[in-house]
Image: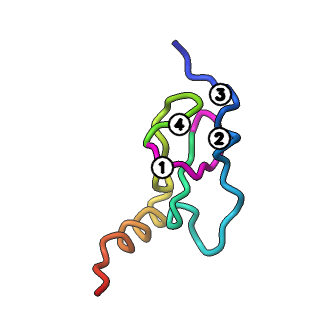
Amino acid sequence: MTNVCKGVCIKYKAVGYKGKHRYNIGQKRCPVCEEFLKYLGIRCPCCSVKLRTTPRGNKARKEIQSERNCVWY
């Protein structure tokens, strides 16, 4: 069984962002559909592949993880 984009993900397509990283505002990326999605689930609604929640680059990933680990009072 191959994972193929069926076009369902277009309903959840993210329409841009402000700031440095898309992942900080909750956008996720599907590696099969090659789209950023605004979707609450863990898997793509179109092809059922697990969505990326962090960037692939080490520097950017460390920045996002350090921001998520900060405790705000």
Q: Amino acid at mark 4?
A: Cys
Q: Which residue is mark 3?
A: 5
The quarter of the picture where residue 71 lies is bottom left
Q: Counting other residues with Cα less than 10 Å from the Cα at mark 4, is it few (<14), some (14-19), or many (20 or more)?
A: many
**Residue 34: which disc?**
2
Could you tell me residue 50's position as x and y percent? 45, 37
Instruction: Indicate the secondary structure of the residue bearing disc 2.
Output: loop
State which tag comes first along the sequence, 4 or 2. Answer: 2
Of all residues, the one furthest to the bottom in this rendering is 73
Query: Can you tell which of label 1 and label 3 is closer to the viewer?
Result: 1
As measured in the structure, the alpha-carbon distance from the residue carrying label 4 to the one carrying label 1 is 10 Å
Q: Residue at x 39, y 74 (%)?
A: 67
Q: Which residue is mark 1?
A: 40
Q: Please rate how many residues cluster around mark 2, counting C-alpha atoms within 10 Å: few if below 14, some from 14 to 19, many from 20.
A: few
Magenta-tinted stretch: 31-41
Q: Which mark is first along the chain, 2 or 1?
A: 2
Image spot of residue 8 (x, y percent): 66, 32
